[in-house]
Image (cartoon, helix red, strand yellow):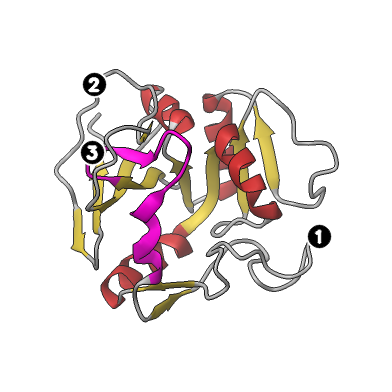
Amino acid sequence: MGSVIMHNVVSVDGFIADKNDGVGPLHDWYFSGDTQLTETGAGAGDGDGDGDGGYDHSEGGGGFKLSRVSAEYVQPVWDSIGVIVMGRHQFDLVNGWEGRPPAGDHVVVVSHRPKPEGWHPGAPYHFVDGVKAAVEKAQELAGDRVVAVSAGEAGGQILAAGLVDEVAMDVVPVVFGSGKRFFGSFDGQQLLEDPHVVIQGNRVLHLRFKVRR
């Protein structure tokens, strides 16, 4: 069974977006380099499935271009992902990337509500009520590959349930002051091991911590 890794880009004061869900400069490093990142999600960019061509996750048409150092870290991480777990709020914000995940073969959405009626019926998306059931479904689908959990409210609940193996942060040198927290409303205490990945990129610091049991 693959690892469950909670991940997001984050400000130095622990926010993944401002109060209006704006990310400001958090994602600038995705476009400031000269090394192309290859998306690995099911049907990414190939025109198969129920859409008209690949979904532009970069939102600018040019794809993701990272510094060489960041690309050498991020590409194998994306390649290792089997399933993404996201909360319903994020799903609604991006409309589920129009049924095309940027990495992995499936997406599990933690939601009390079902999939929107008529929404991309062939997309590999699964709507599951409850974080434990969502992680179980994701692990079943991922097999030996990684389950990537998006940070935020759902991610914080999954951490609180003791289901996260690692925490991965791409820390950007900006202070938001307020906004949406990396760990959502989680207010417990969870020890992490010393970081086993520390990589300095261009305007980003890649960190990974194993969760201490």
Seen from this angle, which residue lies furthest left?
Answer: 194
Q: Residues within 10 Å of mark 3 (few under 14, many from 20)?
A: some
Three-letter residue code for mark 1? Asp
Q: Tag 2, which secondary structure?
A: loop
Q: Which residue is mark 3?
A: 13
**Labels 2 and 3: the sequence-earlier one:** 3
**Residue at (24, 63) in percent of width and height:** 203
Residue 1 visible from this viewpoint: no
Residue 15 lies, in percent from the top left, at 33, 38
Whole-number angstrom distance, CA of label 2 to CA of label 3: 17 Å
In the rendered view, does 131 fall on the left or right side of 77? right
Using the image, tell me which numbered label, if any, was put on residue 189: 2
Above-or-below relation of 1 to 156: below
Three-letter residue code for mark 2? Gln
Q: Which residue is mark 1?
A: 50
Q: Start and end of the magenta stretch? A: 11-31
Q: Tag 1, which secondary structure?
A: loop
User: Which image quadrant: the C terminus?
Assistant: top left
Q: Which of label 3 and label 1 is nearer to you?
A: 3
In the rendered view, does 163 fall on the left or right side of 87? left
Three-letter residue code for mark 3? Asp
Of residues 4 and 125, which is closer to you in this image?
A: 125
Give the quarter of the image for residue 31.
bottom left
Whole-number angstrom distance, CA of label 2 to CA of label 1: 43 Å
Give the quarter of the image for residue 3.
top left
**Labels 3 and 1: the sequence-earlier one:** 3
